[in-house]
Image (tube, rainbow, N blue to C red):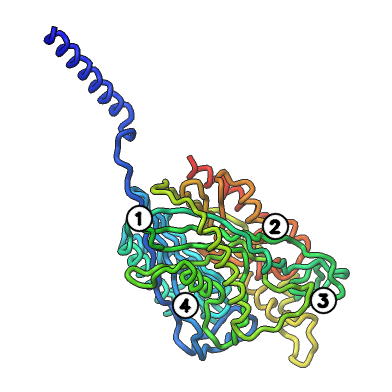
């Protein structure tokens, strides 16, 4: 009897082992150990020397005489065990693709991270030196042109920052969330009662920054996106490692013209570190604010009343409100031990807006005017120069469109100053539960209005400010959605 029971039990155990072995053969991932999720962050100082010209406004760039706050390339690296994703946000008004490409190639050579997995963007501070060439070179076609000293410095420091973040990689939890900060967002393009003159001798239906309490105001030409999105990573013991935020506000300003500053982007990074009681050292917590789709949005309430602030005061107000809202949502995050990471990118060919013979003739006429002659528009000579400059661009260009997947979160990257309604459309049509878009990423090709906004005119649609075909936004949104679906699968 005992021998019969023993044989029965051995047979049952054998069948059980055979069943388990069969399941492993059919689906080896079923019993595979879940890979560890890791994260690391860093900052790399990219402050230019005093005397460098500060760009972001019209006219001759004033030389920097004071550093209010150091400029940085801030990096966050995520690793799901098989795939690494790299975010770098650089304190600059806009950086040409050639600089970003050189940085990515150097990062790949030194770390073996594929360039498609590296997303580098500018945050659009208007108080930094040019990373797109100086003088007449800036704004011109730059492909094949050697990088200047500051551009080469940026390439090296961006790559250094990624290497430091990789050295800081450690097992981590990840979570994300979004809050709302609507009070600092105003669409800066206004429909006017009467058409307004533009630098090309024509008239627009829309004016940018028309002046507070202007009696000719009708209504804003577009909306705003109040959402502040963010990704948070913590060590397994709950120590903050890094936080990458995204908000669709252009820049704040209020900076003396000869001061170097990273604007509200840096103030936010400092404030969120303080609020979540994170350590700056050993290894450091890194706060990062990227620029969302803010090509037509600033923080000036044209409806009034007028505000008067001391230098740097308004950016502190904006950054503090953002940090407090992020903190509110931060406290509710459900962190995940592991999420899949994916990346996809493509080269999208776009037509370049070329000046007509009539536009070139008008530009030459404007440039030939004596200084004593009253201009039709205060920027007519600037745009006459840009018109002729655009004549030197190729007929078509390839721009890099990129997407990241972080679990159920989708991140898009577009190399333009993107109108807010485009970002809202991407969020609405995205296959992910949550999404946001980083602008001025992987290049800087001017403003990206919608076709409808092109019809209204205004600064952001002018040739030289806008450089590509009027249907570009529709093609870019379509490409982003295609890439989103690709990484989601």
Q: Nearer the viewer, residue 122 or 370?
A: 122
Label 2: few (<14), some (14–19) or many (≥20) C-alpha neighbours in 10 Å: some
Q: What residue is shown at x 87% (from left), y 75% (from top)?
A: 215
> Percent position (x, y) of residue 383?
69, 76
**Image mark for residue 248:** none
Residue carrying label 4: 71
Q: Nearer the viewer, residue 8 or 351?
A: 8
> Percent position (x, y) of residue 261?
53, 80
Q: Give the CA separation, mark 2 to mark 1.
A: 44 Å
Q: Give the CA separation, mark 2 to mark 4.
A: 32 Å
Q: Earlier in the sequence, mark 2 or mark 4?
A: 4
**Image mark for residue 213:** 3
Q: Secondary structure at mark 3?
A: loop
* Residue 200 visible in rendering: no
**Disc 3, disc 4: CB below 8 Å?**
no
**Image mark for residue 236:** 1
**Disc 2, disc 1: CB below 8 Å?**
no
- Can you name the residue that lies furthest to the left here? 3
> Percent position (x, y) of residue 390?
63, 70
Q: Give the CA separation, mark 3 to mark 2.
A: 27 Å
Q: Is residue 285 left or right of residue 219?
A: left
């Amino acid at each position: 009897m005992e021998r019969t029971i023993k044989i029965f039990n051995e047979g049952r155990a054998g069948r059980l082992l055979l069943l388990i072995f069969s399941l492993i053969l059919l689906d080896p991932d079923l019993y595979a150990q879940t890979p560890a999720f890791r994260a690391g962050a860093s900052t790399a100082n990219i402050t230019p020397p005093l005397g460098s010209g500060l760009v972001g406004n019209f006219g001759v760039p004033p030389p920097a005489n004071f550093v209010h706050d150091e400029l940085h390339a801030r990096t966050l690296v995520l690793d799901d065990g098989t795939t690494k994703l790299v975010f770098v946000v650089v304190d600059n008004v806009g950086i040409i693709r050639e600089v970003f490409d050189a940085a990515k190639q150097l990062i790949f050579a030194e770390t073996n991270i594929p360039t498609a997995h590296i997303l580098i963007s500018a945050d659009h501070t208007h108080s930094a030196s040019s990373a797109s060439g100086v003088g007449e070179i800036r704004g011109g076609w730059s492909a094949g042109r050697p990088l200047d000293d500051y551009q080469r410095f940026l390439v090296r420091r961006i790559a250094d920052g990624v290497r430091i973040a990789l050295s800081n990689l450690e097992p981590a939890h990840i979570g994300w969330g979004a809050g709302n900060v609507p009070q600092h967002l105003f669409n800066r393009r206004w429909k006017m009662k009467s058409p307004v003159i533009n630098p090309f001798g024509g008239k627009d239906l829309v004016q940018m920054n028309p002046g507070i309490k202007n009696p000719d105001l009708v209504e804003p030409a577009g909306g705003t996106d109040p959402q502040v999105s963010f990704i948070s990573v913590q060590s397994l013991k709950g120590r903050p490692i890094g936080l990458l935020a995204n908000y669709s506000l252009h820049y704040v300003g209020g900076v003396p013209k000869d001061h170097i500053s990273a604007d509200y982007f840096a103030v936010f990074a400092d404030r969120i570190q303080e609020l979540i009681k994170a350590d700056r050292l050993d290894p450091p917590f890194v706060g990062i604010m990227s620029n969302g789709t803010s090509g037509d949005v600033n923080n000036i309430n044209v409806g009034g009343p007028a505000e008067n602030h001391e230098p740097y005061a308004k950016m502190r107000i904006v950054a503090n409100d953002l940090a407090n809202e992020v903190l509110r949502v931060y406290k509710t995050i459900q962190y995940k031990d592991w999420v899949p990471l994916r990346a996809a990118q493509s080269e999208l060919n776009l037509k370049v807006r070329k000046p007509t013979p009539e536009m070139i003739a008008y530009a030459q006429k404007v440039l030939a005017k004596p200084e004593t002659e009253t201009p039709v528009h205060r920027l007519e000579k600037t745009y006459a120069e840009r018109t002729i400059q655009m004549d030197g661009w190729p007929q078509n260009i390839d721009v890099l469109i990129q997407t990241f997947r972080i679990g159920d979160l989708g991140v898009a990257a577009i190399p333009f100053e993107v109108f807010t309604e485009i970002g809202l459309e991407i969020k609405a049509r995205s296959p992910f539960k949550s999404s946001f878009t980083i602008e001025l990423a992987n290049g800087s090709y001017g403003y990206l209005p919608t076709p409808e906004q092109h019809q209204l005119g205004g600064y952001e649609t002018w040739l030289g400010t806008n450089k590509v075909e009027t249907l570009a936004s529709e093609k870019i949104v379509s490409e982003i959605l295609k890439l989103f679906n690709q990484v989601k699968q």
